[in-house]
Amino acid sequence: MINKTFNLQLTGQQVKQYKRNHKLPPSGETGWFNKGHIPANKGKKFPNMPHNSGMFEKGNKPYNYMPVGSERVNGDGYVDIKIADPNKWKQKHIIIWEKAHKRKKPAGHVIIFADKNCFNFDIDNLLLVPCREFLKMNRQGLIKNDTELTKTGLLIARLQNKVQDRKKYK
């Protein structure tokens, strides 16, 4: 039709390639419904379902539902505990630290594993570290596989931050 209309000698592959190169939609359609479009199933009822009942019955839970108190390992390798429905999770080491210290984790702080083992929930292995010091520890590789070395690294980061603050205010 193009050849006849415009007196050309193009093959089907040439026309197809031209449309692809110029990002033309096939046959001029965008794939969107035009304004005012009426769906084909408008006013039709879903077969064998009472009116306004929905697809799922009340009380049914999905096969992968986990009750409150369940544990999982998240994508970062930390253990999470489900604390409420629907889908409210909190990291286990934070819960243990808060329970042991009877207070919430302060804003601007992180709780780290002193021996880098995400499954060692011993309270002596959990350290509350200000974000500023945690940043310095990460940058300088001061978090080690040994608890005592990590605690020493925290003291080094703290000292470096104090020196930096003193230089800033002179």
Image: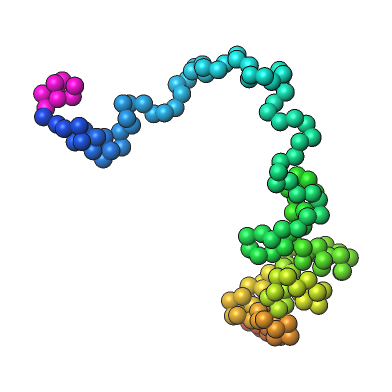
Q: Residue at x 78, y 71 (%)?
A: 121
Q: How is the image coloured?
A: rainbow
Q: Is residue 152 magenta?
A: no
Image position of 114 with respect to 63: above or below: below
Q: Position of residue 48 (x, y in %)?
A: 67, 19
Residue 80 placement, left or right of 32: right
Magenta region, mostly helix, strand or loop?
A: helix
Q: Quadrant of residue 12?
A: top left
Q: Residue at x 23, y 38 (%)?
A: 17
Q: Is residue 20 above or below residue 7?
A: below
Q: Is residue 95 left or right of residue 73?
A: right
Q: Quadrant of residue 50?
A: top right
Tell me the magenta residue range.
Answer: 1-8
User: From this viewpoint, is residue 70 visible?
Assistant: yes
State the image coordinates of residue 128 (x, y, percent, origin top left). Answer: 76, 72
In this rendering, the answer to whether 101 lies above or below 74 is below
Residue 170 can be seen, yes or no: no
Q: Which residue is situated farthest in the right direction here?
A: 102
Query: Which quadrant holds the N terminus?
Result: top left
Residue that appears at 82% across and 66% down: 96
Closest to the observer, 56 or 33: 56
Residue occupying image coordinates x 71% and y 17%:
51
Position of residue 123 measured from the top left corner of the image (x, y, whole percent): 82, 74
Q: Position of residue 157 (x, y in %)?
A: 67, 81
**Which one is in front, 129 or 11?**
11
Q: Quadrant of the C terminus?
A: bottom right
Q: How many numbered tags mark residues here?
A: 0
